[in-house]
Amino acid sequence: MTTRRSRGDGGLHWDEQRQRWIATATLGYTPAGKRIVKRASGKTKTEAKAKLKEIIRDHEDGMTTSAHNCTVADAVRDWLEFGLSGREKATLETRTFLANKHVVPALGARKLRELSADDVDRWLAEKAKVLSTRSLREVRSVLKRAVDRAQARDKVKRNVVLLCEIPKGKEGRPSKSLTLDQAAAVLNAAEGSTLHSYVVLSLLLGARTEELRALTWSHVDLDGEPGATPPVPPSIMVWHSVRAGGDTKTRKSRRTLALPERCVTALRDHRVRQDAIRACAGDEWQDHNLVFASKVGTPLDSHNVRRSFRAILKKAGLDEKEWTPREMRHSFVSLLSDSGVPLENISRLVGHSNTTVTETVYRKQLRPVLLEGAEAMDRIFRNA
């Protein structure tokens, strides 16, 4: 006589028509009171019983009934739709491209609960043949965060991506910096252009391009307080950026920078030109109080800046395809380092959280030999 299974252990029966053992388990009820039943089948009773135990175990662990059919592609798309709330448009576009280009085609069809660390290792190894290490880090981050979200919603028990290291990828495009002669040529070529003062501030202050595009006249002081004690120089307040929410990249990026004389002159000339452009635009002018704006006062986007910057590079005799606006910031670091400014001071000027960031990102632009100690000892013993 067959022993009846205990209540809550599910059921097993033979389906003559399908010629398979059928396992069924009641996992609760919907809000409308309808019974939630999960089924599985196997060619043998042992196989069906193992699947039944797995269903019950997953249910006790909090796994949702829909999780069994959830694929990596489902998890990635769910994260793209709901996990990037509040991010700026450029971030959304970049993450969507990385997901659709590198993650979904290779791993999308895999059931999420069956994704293994070996699968991820093989995928990263293949991508390392065509992507730089930085790009590998970004595509791995897309997968990791998508699985994190799925794990938080009980669709998978653990995140196997955390078990996988990032391999070394192809050599990426190294950042470069302008030499002093090249920087001088760019400054001269920019004179008379709409981007002149923008280039001057980028090269002489090291501000990020997104910080300059958000700069307003209310945060510019071209006069200072020379009669104060101590005197207050002309300055700009780098307090905003075009990032989502208007915040700067980090807390320490919020800073006030004294203006070199060349910057003061360039900004005064720029304000005169902008007043003339505003008068010509008339009613079409949209007043956002921006220092750098379009012909009708609207904010500049990165494409506007890149296009104008390439024209200046071409006029300066440089290959416009080899340089980007952000490398004016790298040039600022390089020129200061070559002139002997300490790393800690450079880090504060460019708004880095610490000197590690400055050393890591701009290590090729920093002075490779520390001279302060040798020079100081020479002075000490020469006097002795």
Image (cartoon, rainbow, N blue to C red):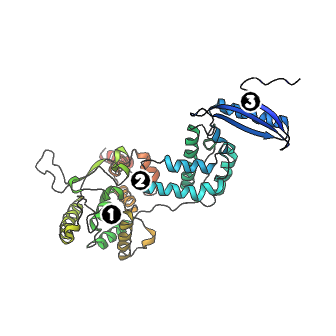
- Rendered image: mark on residue 10: 3
Mark toward the start of the polypeptide (1 vs 3): 3
> In the image, is 224 to the left or to the right of 89?
left
Q: Give the percent coordinates (x, y) of residue 234.
A: 19, 54
Quarter containing the N terminus: top right
Quick one: SS at disc 2? Answer: loop
Residue 161 placed where, x, y %? 62, 44
| Amino acid type, mark 3 | Gly
* Dot placed on the residue nearer the N-terminal end, 1 or 2: 2
For the residues marked 1 and 2, what is the alpha-carbon distance in whole angstroms? 16 Å
Identify the amino acid type marked 1: Leu
Q: Tell me the residue that label 1 is attached to.
A: 300
Badge 1: residue crowd in 10 Å (few <14, some 14–19, many ≥20): some
Kindly identify the amino acid type of the residue bearing the numbered disc 2. Answer: Glu
As measured in the structure, the alpha-carbon distance from the residue carrying label 3 to the one carrying label 2 is: 49 Å
The residue tagged 2 is: 88
Task: Describe the element under mark 3 as helix, strand or loop.
Answer: loop
